[in-house]
Image (cartoon, rainbow, N blue to C red):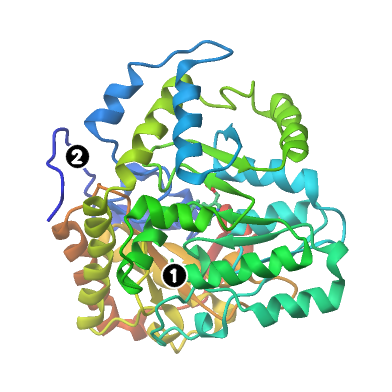
Amino acid sequence: MEPYRIKTVESIPFTTRAEREAALLASGYNVFSIPSDLITIDLLTDSGTSAMSDRQWAALMTGDESYAGSRNYFRFEETVRRITGYDHIIPTHQGRVAENLLFTTVVKEGDHVPNNIHFDTTQANIEHNGGVAVNCVIDDAYDPVKEVPYKGNMDITKLDKVLADVGRDRIPLVLLTITNNSGGGQPVGLDNAREVSEWCRKHDIPFIYDACRFAENAYFNKVRSNLDQGIPEIARAFFDLADGCTMSAKKDALVNMGGWLALNDDELSEKITNMLILIEGFPTYGGLAGRDLEAIAQGLEEVLEERYLAHRVGQIQEFGRALCDAGVPIVLPVGGHAVYIDAKRFLPHIPQEQFPAQALTCALYLEGGIRGCEIGGLMFAADGQWPELELVRLAVPRRVYTKSHLDHVVDVCAKLYSERESISGLRITYEAPVLRHFTVRLEPVD
Ligand code: F0G
């Protein structure tokens, strides 16, 4: 059961099918363009959508909005340092700014940056600096039904190949995303992180986590590897293996906005802090209000509670199981923050060039007022190369929806599956040159 009770409630919108049909048409079949007032269950993202606790709301009132040296920064810094062990804690207003600060400082034209699988903004920030983002996840990650415990693991032989192809001087850092969002929210095992760490040490290459969902990743390790340590100790065992992390506090810090970059390297931190002042703000607020920093510090205490994580991860597992029981093809095993529907198996009659995952995303909205997120050809196809996976992500915000909300989603998915042949493909009518999925417009093929 939920390890909390509800103190404040928020009404959710209900719409008619005719209203949803009109909204889809007006949005160009792009659910990013539909106003949230027309969404009944919003599973677009787990990012910035968490419900804060009473203690976090109370923490806001202790905000010290001094330009420099706010006491909230010191609690934030102490908390992040205690959890990660890193020396320099640089606040940013969200994760991609931490990425941007890091990559503009270390990535040069032609550099290669390996990761298990890059998130879209991570890849775009590397490419923006002339770099090449290379995905080195184990092959099992591309098999949507193969059940292995740590499907987010890095394949060390793929790292060796990047090294052999481009040489050590063209690899400014290695990233590891915990959990691996673009590959299904799949965890990375501690042993694998250790191997990546050893590989990086051997070749003298910095090792940085993309740590957005580090607590969920630690919980998977506790359960799947039967570890005796508590969640904070497991998380720390991961952080001890690397030289720093980028973080979107909008996920595993249980807040609606925030992030950080944490590093051990003094010289690099100094350079980045100077850039921070230029684009984000003074080093003790970095684009955030003092009260936001306090809410992050409090959220980090709560996210590491085992009872919270057992419910959080358990809710997603149960959601996935119910979809499986209804015959809906999903990525297995179920990840930590979302269930991913396998659109290639759901809609085998729609060729990948007609964006089956986007077609299914639109059908979910039309049928049930549910907003999911396409993670497939629309998001990742480039230069005639199509991604292997064609998924619809149903990301579950933290502490927001109950079982009956998710039961509605299961019912809608099951109904659509039984009528799947009536769903048709889409074609693009407008696209932006980068990150096109946010603003793309489409129309039905038929
Ligand atoms: N890295 C990962 C693995 C992410 O999932 C995200 C965001 C970011 C970096 C960027 O963080 O949004 O704070 O700038 N993921 C959200 C999502 C947007 O929906 O998965 P940000």
The one of 220 and 439 positioned closer to us in this rendering: 220
Please state the horizontal and vertical placement of residue 370, each as a whole percent of the image.
Answer: 31, 59
Q: Secondary structure at mark 2?
A: loop
Question: Given this view, does label 2 or label 1 mark the residue nearer the observer?
Answer: 1
The numbered disc on residue 186 is 1
In three-dimensional space, the C-alpha distance between marks 2 and 1, rounded to whole angstroms, equals 32 Å
The numbered disc on residue 215 is none
38 to the left or right of 131: left
At label 1, counting other C-alpha atoms closer than 10 Å, the crowd grade (few under 14, some 14-19, many 20 or more) is many
| Disc 2 residue: CB within 8 Å of ligand 1 | no
Measured along the vertical axis of the image, is residue 416 above or below residue 236? below
Q: Secondary structure at mark 1?
A: loop
Q: Quadrant of residue 22?
A: bottom left
Which amino acid type corresponds to the residue marked 1 in the rendered image? Gln
Residue 202 appearing in the image: yes
Q: Residue at x 43, y 66 (%)?
A: 185
Please state the horizontal and vertical placement of residue 193, each as a whole percent of the image.
Answer: 55, 67
Q: Residue at x 49, y 36 (%)?
A: 258
The one of 395 and 315 positioned closer to us in this rendering: 315
| Viewport quadrant of the N terminus | bottom left
Q: Residue at x 47, y 61 (%)?
A: 29
The one of 232 and 158 positioned closer to us in this rendering: 232
Residue, far top:
66
Q: Residue at x 28, y 64 (%)?
A: 316
Which amino acid type corresponds to the residue marked 2 in the rendered image? Ser
Q: How many numbered dots are placed on residues in this image?
A: 2
At label 2, counting other C-alpha atoms closer than 10 Å, the crowd grade (few under 14, some 14-19, many 20 or more) is few
93 to the left or right of 106: left
Please state the horizontal and vertical placement of residue 302, each as a whole percent of the image.
Answer: 30, 41
First in sequence, mark 2 or 1: give its number.
2
- Residue that numbered label 2 is attached to: 11
Please state the horizontal and vertical placement of residue 137, each as a whole percent of the image.
Answer: 59, 75
